[in-house]
Amino acid sequence: ALPLSVGIASCCELLDFDLEGEKVPVSEIKAKLNNALVPGIRVVDVYDDGRKIKHLAYLRCQVDFEYDKGVPEKAAEAMKSFFANDSIIVEKHSKNGIVQQDIAPMIRRLDVAVAEKDLIRIEAVVCCQNPTLNPMQLSAAVEKYLPEHKADFVKYSRIEIYDTEENIFR
């Protein structure tokens, strides 16, 4: 569910599958999957009769803006103010080409903070289905509207996924 773009890290992936035949205990499924996975990837938990993927609604993400020469003065304040706008139009690549998309309504919560002398961190809860906001669109918006605060490197992470009530999705 919710495949990631190349370059986005995640600590909460979902694998939704059905097993045919004889019922297998979830603890056994977890062990068998972990024995078959490559180093660095592991199954944390297995749930029997999980919820339907259509109930996914939000994801919590982290976007780190790294600056080689330190965080520009007032950059975090400018980003906070910018993301408070009622409308933020960015380009999105779709099956039909490039389209304009307003990402502001898809941002449920967003916080901006200077995390280190050379790092601004955005933590946000955004829509992940119908419509979907890819965390990469947050940095694209900064590049487009706040070019003086464009980072030298940006790192993206998906932290958690939620249902419509913002309960952790399982």
Image (tube, rainbow, N blue to C red):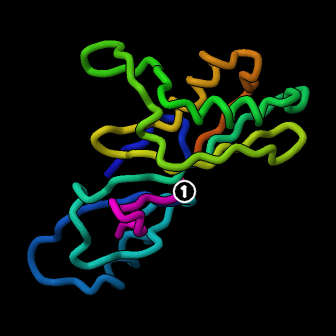
Question: From this viewpoint, is residue 36 visible?
Answer: no
- Up the image or down, 33 lies above or below 107; here it is below
Closest to the observer, 161 or 77: 77
Q: Is residue 131 left or right of residue 72?
A: left
Picture mark count: 1
Q: Secondary structure at mark 1?
A: strand
At x 51%, y 53%, the residue is 60
Q: Quadrant location of residue 48?
A: bottom left
Q: Is residue 169 magenta?
A: yes
Q: Which residues are magenta?
A: 159-170
Left or right, 47 with respect to 31, comes to left
Choose between 24 and 81: the one closer to the eye.
81
Quadrant in which residue 29 is drawn: bottom left
The picture places residue 98, in percent across and down from the top left corner, at 36, 13
Q: Which residue is pictured at 27% across the width and 41% down the height?
A: 130
Q: Residue furthest front?
A: 86
Q: Position of residue 24 (x, y in %)?
A: 22, 83
- Rendering coords of residue 72 (x, y %): 85, 27
Q: Name the residue tied to disc 1.
A: 159
Q: Name the side, left or right, on which 163 lies relative to 4.
A: left
Question: What residue is at 35 percent from the left and 75 percent from the top?
Answer: 46
Q: On the image, which quarter does residue 149 sit in?
A: top right
